[in-house]
């Protein structure tokens, strides 16, 4: 049963998030958001990308690219795509690049 050893590292040690300069999420028509009764995007998104403050706010840098947000919108008012190549969330092994990013060098 050696494959089931307890691992101390956090799974987040294996994640690099490189936000793109521009959002990969688009609200097609903000007026539709104003008419939306329950604003399900604000609670459906697991990383809280969407918030409501006198209008819909999209904090795209929080996106974990799960792709759930278009399904949360009853008006089909969210256009979502993966960020440009080299940006977004990258899963993998703990690399020298990750260590360099964390140390600020």
Image (cartoon, grey):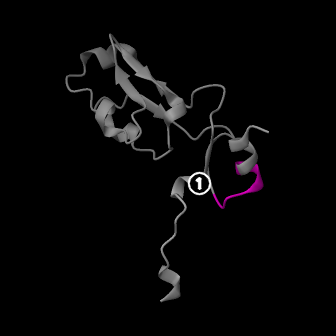
Q: Nearer the viewer, residue 95 or 35?
A: 95
- Determine the residue positioned at 52% across, 69% down: 7
Q: Nearer the viewer, residue 46 or 73?
A: 46
- Does 56 sit above or below residue 47? above
96 inside magenta stretch: yes
Residue at the extreme right of the image, as rendered: 105
- Residue 12 rendering spot, x and y as whole percentages: 54, 52
- Determine the residue positioned at 39% across, 28% down: 50
- Residue 53 rendering spot, x and y as whole percentages: 33, 14
| Kind of element beneath mark 1 | helix
Residue at the extreme top of the image, as rendered: 54
Q: Which residues are magenta?
A: 92-98
The mark tally for this picture is 1
47 inside magenta stretch: no
Q: Is residue 82 left or right of residue 102?
A: left
- Determine the residue positioned at 59% across, 54% down: 13
Question: Residue 88's quadrant in the figure?
Answer: top right
- Does 81 sit above or below residue 91? above
- Residue 38 rendering spot, x and y as whole percentages: 21, 27
- Determine the residue positioned at 35% across, 32% down: 76
**How many C-alpha atoms fall within 10 Å of the one at disc 1: few (<14), some, or many (≥20)?**
some
Q: Is residue 92 left or right of residue 97?
A: left
- Does 69 sit above or below residue 6? above
Question: Residue 91's quadrant in the figure?
Answer: bottom right
Residue at the extreme bottom of the image, as rendered: 1
Q: Is residue 57 left or right of residue 2?
A: left
- Residue 61 rendering spot, x and y as whole percentages: 54, 31
Which residue, given by chain and number where applicable, does mark 1 sit on?
Answer: 13
The quarter of the picture where the C terminus appears is top right
């Amino acid at each position: 049963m050696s494959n089931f050893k307890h691992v101390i590292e956090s799974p987040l040690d294996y994640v690099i998030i490189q936000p793109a300069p521009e959002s990969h999420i688009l609200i097609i028509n903000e007026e539709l958001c104003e008419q939306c009764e329950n604003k399900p995007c604000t609670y459906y998104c697991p990383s809280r990308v969407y918030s409501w403050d006198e209008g819909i706010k999209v904090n795209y840098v929080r996106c974990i690219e799960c792709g759930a947000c278009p399904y949360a919108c009853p008006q089909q008012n969210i256009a979502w795509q993966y960020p440009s190549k080299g940006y977004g969330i990258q899963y993998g092994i703990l690399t020298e690049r990750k260590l360099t990013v964390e140390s600020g060098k």
